[in-house]
Image (tube, rainbow, N blue to C red):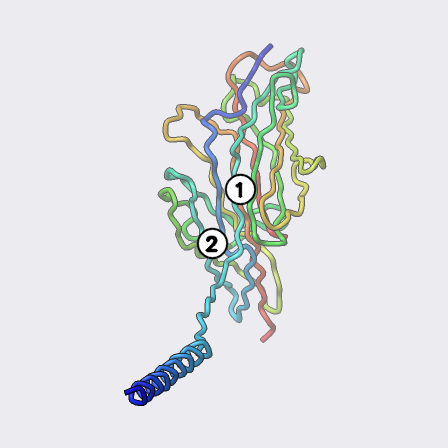
Amino acid sequence: MTRNNSRTRNGGLVALTLVSLTAMTGAANAANIDGEAVFAGAILDTCAVTVPVPGALGSSADATRLGSDEAGGSAAQAQIVTNNPRANLQVIAPTNFTLAPAGSDTDTTFAASHTIDGSTLDAGISALLPVGITTASVDASATKSSGAFEGGAYTMTVTVRCITE
Amino acid sequence: MLLIALCGSAGTAAAQVVSPMIHDVQTVSQIAAARFEVANPYEHAQTSEFFIVDDAGRAVRGAQVSPARKRMAGGARAPLLVRVPVGPNAKRRVYVCHAITPRHPNSVASGTSYRGEVCATLDITRPEH
């Protein structure tokens, strides 16, 4: 009886071992089978301009100049996002008021500038943008060479341009 | 003190998109054609203007852009086709620009604080026959 039990136990042990070895072998084989998932895509280069903070105009004491840098005025904040290393930022000064009392455009010179990291450039001069997000302050002004600005509502448009050069 | 608001409408974030930003085209004909993709990432519909200028910012004579003006829904994308004349054995660079002067849908103001523009570079080469 003992001998039979021993044989049974040994046979069972062998069977168990064989099963274990097979399972282990199977597991090892599964680990060696690797698949590859390939991801590919073409990312177009682009540029986007946002102005989340609009500016405001203030007036000089003698009302001959309206500007975002005058008392009561504030600069606009522009945000540019690009993935192109050749993208540049320009601001284009207004050529006239889009809303103003009659005669406001007469004898008036418009100007604009932008500032990035403390460096200020006048309208028309480009600044190379880094890839990613750039924040720039935009200032604008209108100056009378003769006369003064009347009281009323004024609006002028500054162009913020992202351009590759 | 006279305080005037520079912004005539609510400060809505805005963006103009042109892709790709740099486009190289070779042509054997006197007209080079290129295709861009433009988008209006505004939340609301806006009117886009498209134009082609040279290094000096002047309109390129004989160049055509289609469409020249388009109203797109918020988030919409659209193709832009450009045709530019080029002489034989010549290279020229033009800029294809997308501009939006945003209008907030609830604003009664007639002006806005800024006009956003994005200009892509189009380099055209026409080899000598």
Q: Give the answer, above or below, for where A139 lies relative to B20.
A: above
Left or right: A94 with respect to B82? right
Which chain does tag 1 point to? A
Q: Give the answer, above or below, for where A147 lies relative to B59.
A: above
x and y percentages locating residue A14 in the rendered image = 37, 86
Badge 2: few (under 14), some or many (20 or more) residues near its Cα, within 10 Å? some
Q: Give the answer, above or below, for where A117 lies relative to B19.
A: above
Determine the secondary structure under disc 2.
Answer: strand
Q: Seen from this angle, which residue lies furthest left?
A: A1
Determine the secondary structure under disc 1.
Answer: strand
x and y percentages locating residue A27 in the rendered image = 41, 77
Task: Residue under label 1, please give it.
Answer: A49
Badge 1: few (under 14), some or many (20 or more) residues near its Cα, within 10 Å? many
The quadrant in which the N terminus of chain B is found is top right
Q: Residue at x 34, y 85 (%)?
A: A15
The label on residue B64 is: 2
x and y percentages locating residue A20 in the rendered image = 39, 80
Q: Seen from this angle, which residue lies furthest front?
A: A1
Mark 1 vs mark 2: give the one in front.
1
The quadrant in which the C terminus of chain B is found is bottom right
Which chain does tag 2 point to? B
Q: Residue at x 59, y 68 (%)?
A: B88
The residue type indicated by label 1 comes to: Val
The residue type indicated by label 2 comes to: Gln
x and y percentages locating residue A157 in the rendered image = 54, 31
Q: CA distance from mark 1 to mark 2?
A: 25 Å
